[in-house]
Amino acid sequence: MFHHDDHPEKIVHISDEAFFSGLDLETAGLEKVRNAVSSGEWNTAFSDLWTHWLTREQPVNPLTDSREKLLSRMIGNRELADIIVDGGKRQLSQVELDFSLPIEFNASFGDQSKYGFHYLIWMESLPHAAIESGDNRYITAYLDILSQWYAARDTITGARPMHPVFYELGLSGRSKRFLDFMYAMKLLDTGSKLSPNHVRILFKSLLGAGRWLTLEQTTKGYRQGNWQVHGFWGLLTIGYTIPEFRESTEFRSVGAEYLEHHLERDYYEDGGHSERCYSYGSGCLKHFEEATLLAEANPQIAITTKHDWRSHVAKAFSWFLKMAGPGGECPGINDGLFMKPVDLFQRAAEFTGDSSYLRPIRHELTETPESEEPEFRSMQLGPSEFCVMRTGWEPDDTFMLVNYGQYPGGHSHMGILDFNLYAQGVPMAAEVGRFGPYDAPLNLFYRSEQAHNHIVVEGAESARAEIRGEDIEFGSTDAFDFFAGIHRGYETSAQVIIERRILFIKPWGFLISDAVSCSPRRRSALWYLHSPFPINTSADQALASGEGIGMVIAPADPRQIKYAHTGIDYLEEMVQEMPLYSGVPPTVHWPDRYFIALRGWNILEPVTPFDVLLVPFRGDQPKASVEPMECNVVGNPSRPARPRALRVKSNDQELHIFHSIPGVSVSTHEITFSGCTAAIELQDGTPTRAFVHKGDALGIRGTQIPVSGEGSEVFNL
């Protein structure tokens, strides 16, 4: 729907007379504007409007009321700002711009990048530099580019079925940036730099954006996902900061209506956003937070609401804390880049008054704040479909995030029952994630099955979009955490069901036990793991390692190492080549990524097990291994389970692991178990402790252990 084509005189080409008829000229403080309008002195009217806006006391904007807050809202890039001011050259996406010449706003920046270019994020470098330096040259350059852009904006064409300028993300994002620029002028006390035409451009752009965004919501109705969140946020931002527009009450009313639709329908009960993605979820959260703060700061124009916005925002903040690593890390889940959201947790602490948000980032702050440790560690987030395992909240504590959830749409990736693992203060097993625009060379790879820490059936098409994890089990104790689930992503294309069980042997290792169930034909499967560290293989295991740090990758079947392949996902120099419409390469933590793909199949049986021990370390490499144990299985296991026993060793640690299902017993070394999973710790060959998840019987050397069959239990022997 092209609202700008249907209503050009209200959105694109607003005449001066029509603009001022859209102002409530009876507003206190607009007397001079009203007089100039009555005389048809349009330039004077715009100048007086600007003076009014700079000097009025209300509404209050708590988002821009200090130098620090304004700087935090802009992407600073002094190098780019200086290139622009000095008339140099810079590549933006697929085009090199010469800033000594008029800018070609309709250049071929790329499919998605052209839309991103017209967000005008790259222009933020100029007011940011002006605030930092006080140099007005940056403001002059900004205003010159703004005038060029405004003159060209309706001549720009795009390859997508939407206009590069007049669409929801562009209009809402640019409105925020124009307002931030206006508040920067107020902060710098350089409002006189703006000519009447500059004021005309800014205010007409904001009024046109508000009208377009109102039509978008009211004609299309509720739409799940971040696009409409941007839309209603833009409406609320314009409506609260420029109540002088006659339509501002409608902007606020429509914005509030759709904000509440999203509170009701676009968020899980645990506070997670529907797109199941750190980056887009954090962006949506910020929009809800800002809308809440604007409404609270301006009760004289606030809209009556059904919901307590503040409590919903607090719940969304809590989701990020539950999902964060002990050092504040957020892995690259779906269309998210690895991030350490220091700003988000600082805002959360201020918004909620809860110091525990500062706990995971306290080492990142200049002054170490007093903070309480969060009252939770390992947990299952059932509504948003993640499981978290962690040993604590110190930066070098161990953390694993497991994803078993639905595929919610365009920002989803193909990972399922996949994980990210952090230990010793660094990511050890980190998926590829995503960075750069959607027309970047690696975009399809980011999303692919091969870019995630899970199993891929070779040559088969995954039905990831139609499935989620099933039969999910989770349990946590002081000594062990446990996850299990299956998925049917390859059931239609290859008649394969995949089971994954993860046993966290705290604090030192993870046993990943997978079963690839094939029937009736045999299939080859690849067990993928990605790491920031180069991966090298020996005869029976692999090692992801850097200087004095690393992780042992030890499969129970040495053939899976022999048949494996390793390689590079990307290197830092490849990251630097990504085309960006913001004018700077992406900030990618751990910009090198490597992978190993263990290969396995089973001819004699329809189920191929992958049992892989992961042992992170710093300093000396541990002697770690896992091996199958001969065992006796009684009963008929249902697909895809593979009852088996394993011996796990790491230095002086030894455990016997039993995988089965209720009603099917596995026996070896005077131990018999039936149920889901059991781990028996031994010292000098003697069992000392048992972990059991949903065990219906456990006998150890003639003694029956009183298992309950419910959840996770630990028994001292």
Image: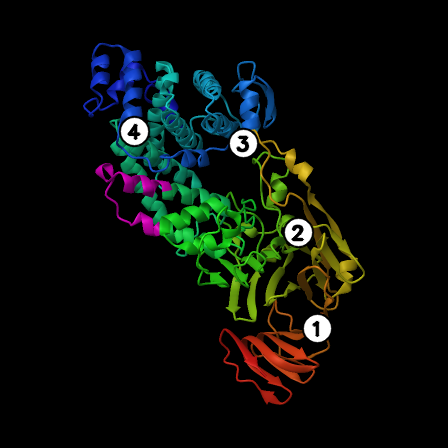
Instruction: Measure the alpha-carbon separation of dots 3 and 1.
Output: 55 Å
Q: How far apart are marks 2 and 4 (CA)?
A: 49 Å
Residue depth check, mark 3 versus mark 1: number of the one nearer the observer: 1
**Residue found at x 28% / y 17%:** 48
Return the residue nearer the eye: 27 or 594: 27
Q: In the rendered image, which residue does mark 4 sit on?
A: 242
Disc 1 marks which residue?
A: 652
Q: Which one is nearer the viewer's eye here, 361 or 97?
A: 361
- For the view shown, which residue lies furthest in the right direction? 539
Q: Mark 3 points at which residue?
A: 112
Q: How many marks?
A: 4
Can residue 352 be seen at all in this image of the molecule?
yes
Tell me which residue sits at (50%, 33%) in the image: 75
Question: Disc 2 vs disc 1: which is toward the camera?
Answer: 1
Magenta stretch in the rendered image: 290-312
Residue 196 rendering spot, x and y as whole percentages:
34, 14
**Farthest-out residue, front:** 367
- Horizontal side, residue 361 vs residue 607: left or right: left
Q: Position of residue 89 (x, y in %)?
A: 60, 20
Q: Where is residue 278 in the image (x, y as percent from the top left)?
A: 50, 47
Q: Describe the element under mark 1 as helix, strand or loop.
A: loop
Residue 530: give its label.
Answer: 2
Q: Do the residues labelled 4 and 1 touch (CB within 8 Å)?
A: no
Element on which disc 4 rests: loop
Q: How crowded is mark 1: few (under 14 residues within 10 Å), some or many (20 or more)?
A: few
Amino acid type of the residue that numbered disc 1 sits on in the rendered structure = Asp
Residue 522: in sight, yes or no? no
Determine crowd level at label 4: few under 14, some 14-19, many 20+ residues with C-alpha closer than 10 A. many
Q: Is mark 2 on a helix, strand or loop?
A: strand
